[in-house]
Image (cartoon, helix red, strand yellow):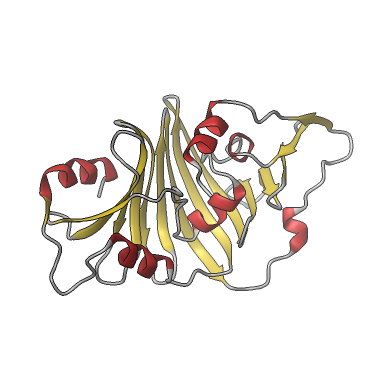
């Protein structure tokens, strides 16, 4: 299910809410956010991405620990490390095997996207990989029903301002997708294909970026080694501090995403 098609369908198919279900945005959102998340996820994944018209595909080793620790390695078919990025939620480190530079800096969305091009902060990315996308912190909330897709649609914010649509399954109150708008302009979206305890696929779209992360062989709620999130630059590599002040960070700040 393409999320952009879902958005188009929603625009003309929102009718009365089911009488036997929640009747307010607050109730639907509360039930969605009450679903427990795994505290850790570790294993293998597949990245397929189109960035500025160029295709990237690579196998990943992924380690995630809530609330904000992420470790991702791009690996060869024989599991040799090709590149790595890690953060403890505050600082990030990234380098390539055989490279001469080790990238370091604050763990802002721009730096987090240097290996896997998903421009979210660690506090957003860690739960997003487990099925809970970042949400706008705004008081205006509206609930509608998409009859064609049989989904609740929670809208945070007003159409004439930055706002967000969240698509929720009525069967189990999973969040199956979300779209962020700047007025009428679509800024970014996340779509989930649900697994039993966490999404099997995360599909992220933003300007010039289309990324699918397919989770494979993932273990949940096992202890995660803190050293995986506290990488240091290898000896002999030049340490290069990477900046954070750019459009991606400004958009996040303006939208007050927690």
Q: Residue at x 68, y 67 (%)?
A: 224
Front-most of residues 152 and 92:
152
- Which residue corresponds to the image point at 31% horizontal and 65% vertical from the top-left? 28
In-front residue for pair 193/108: 108
221 relative position to 27: left or right: right
Is residue 180 in view from this perspective?
Answer: no
Q: Quadrant of residue 174?
A: bottom left
Task: Point out residue 249 in the picture as x, y percentages from the top left corner.
Answer: 57, 33
- Above-or-below relation of 137 to 187: below
Q: Is residue 172 above or below residue 55?
A: below
Instruction: State the image coordinates of residue 200 (x, y, percent, origin top left).
Output: 41, 60
How many marks the image carries: the answer is: 0
Q: Which residue is located at x 49 percent, y 50 percent?
A: 46
Question: In the image, is residue 56 above or below residue 223?
Answer: above
Residue 158 point in image, percent of width and height: 31, 41
Q: Is residue 18 visible?
A: yes
Along the horizontal axis of the image, is 42 left or right of 91?
Answer: left
Q: Quadrant of residue 188?
A: top left
Asked if residue 143 lies left or right of residue 111, the reply is left
Judged from this view, the residue extending furthest toward the right is 235
Residue 148 image point, x, y percent: 12, 54
């Amino acid at each position: 299910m393409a999320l952009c098609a879902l958005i188009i369908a929603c625009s003309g198919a929102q009718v009365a809410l089911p009488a036997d279900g929640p009747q307010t945005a607050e109730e639907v959102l509360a039930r969605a956010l009450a679903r427990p998340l795994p505290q850790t996820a570790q294993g293998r994944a597949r990245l397929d991405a189109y960035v500025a018209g160029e295709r990237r595909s690579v196998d990943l080793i992924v380690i995630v620990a809530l609330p904000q620790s992420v470790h991702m390695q791009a690996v060869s078919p024989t599991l040799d490390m090709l590149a790595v990025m890690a953060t403890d939620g505050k600082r990030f480190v990234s380098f390539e095997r055989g490279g001469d530079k080790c990238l370091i800096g604050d763990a802002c969305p721009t730096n987090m996207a240097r290996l896997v091009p998903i421009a979210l902060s660690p506090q957003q990315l860690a739960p997003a990989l487990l099925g809970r996308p970042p949400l706008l912190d705004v008081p205006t909330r509206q609930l509608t029903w998409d009859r064609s897709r049989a989904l609740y649609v929670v809208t945070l914010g007003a159409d004439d301002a930055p706002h967000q649509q969240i698509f929720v399954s009525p069967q189990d109150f999973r969040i199956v997708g979300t779209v962020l708008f700047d007025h009428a302009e679509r800024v970014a979206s996340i779509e989930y294909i649900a697994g039993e305890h966490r999404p099997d696929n995360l599909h992220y779209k933003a300007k010039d970026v289309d990324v699918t992360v397919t989770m494979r062989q993932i273990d949940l709620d096992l202890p995660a080694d803190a050293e995986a999130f506290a990488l240091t630059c290898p000896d002999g590599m030049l340490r290069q501090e990477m900046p954070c002040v750019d459009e991606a960070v400004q958009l996040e700040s303006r939208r007050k995403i927690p």
